[in-house]
């Protein structure tokens, strides 16, 4: 099929290939968080949101696994993309070594209906406001000006935090 560079995007994603294959969920989680933040930034910059979160994994023997989950409402928030991707990743983290990890969103729409207030999760509005403040700081001072606990120290030899069990 031909690629139309001027056509509308069907998905927004980010992925990375590892130097060495990784089986540890503790090592995969901060990478997933960083990729989720990249996807979120691209969505916000483009003024779009996605309703389906897609996790992409490639095993050490080059077998591709994709898993997806449709959300009730479109999102552009890194936290929602990450949490959904983390739930999908936990189901796949069975000791298999992965050489590639990716996260994305599809089923795109205008961001006007994205991330409505959640009556059940009263903290969702606070998280959305915090993410907006973080975005503003990063725009002003650079991406590394503010890091989450998941990504803090990544690439500096620090150990990644353990995922929070709910």
Image (cartoon, rainbow, N blue to C red):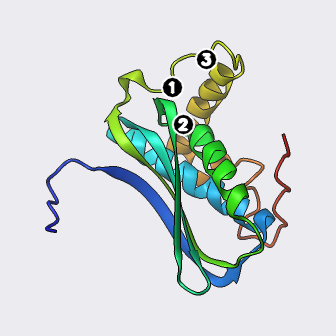
Q: Residue at x 72, y 47 (%)?
A: 148
Task: Looking at the picture, tell me which residue is in the foreground, 18 or 97.
Answer: 97
Alpha carbon distance from label 2 to label 1: 8 Å
User: If you read the primary sequence from the N terminus, does the residue marked by circle 2 or circle 3 appear first?
Assistant: 2
The part of the image, by quadrant, that contains residue 25 is bottom right
Task: Looking at the picture, tell me which residue is in the foreground, 96 or 111.
Answer: 96
Q: State the SS at label 1.
A: loop
Task: Name the mark nearer the viewer: 2 or 3.
Answer: 3
Q: Which residue is mark 2?
A: 77
Position above or below: 94 against 115: below
Residue density around tag 2, few if under 14, some if 14–19, many if 20 or more, within 10 Å: many
Find residue 115 and name its label: 1
* Residue 138 place in picture, x, y as percent: 56, 44
Task: Looking at the picture, tell me which residue is in the foreground, 161 or 98.
Answer: 98
Q: Residue furthest top?
A: 119
For residue 21, side relative to residue 112 (left or right): right
């Amino acid at each position: 099929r031909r690629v139309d560079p001027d056509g509308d995007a069907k998905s927004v994603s980010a992925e990375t290939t590892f130097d060495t294959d990784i089986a540890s969920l503790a090592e995969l989680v901060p990478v997933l968080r960083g990729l989720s933040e990249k996807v979120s930034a691209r969505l916000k910059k483009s003024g779009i949101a996605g309703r389906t979160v897609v996790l992409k994994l490639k095993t050490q023997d080059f077998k591709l696994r994709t898993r997806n989950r449709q959300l009730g409402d479109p999102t552009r928030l890194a936290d929602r993309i990450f949490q959904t991707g983390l739930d999908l990743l936990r189901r796949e983290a069975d000791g298999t070594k992965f050489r590639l990890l990716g996260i994305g969103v599809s089923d795109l729409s205008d961001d006007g209906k994205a991330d409505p207030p959640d009556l059940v999760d009263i903290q969702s509005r606070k998280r959305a406001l915090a993410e907006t403040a973080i975005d503003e700081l990063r725009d002003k001072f650079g991406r590394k000006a503010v890091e989450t606990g998941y990504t803090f120290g990544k690439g500096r030899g620090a150990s990644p935090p353990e995922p929070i069990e709910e």
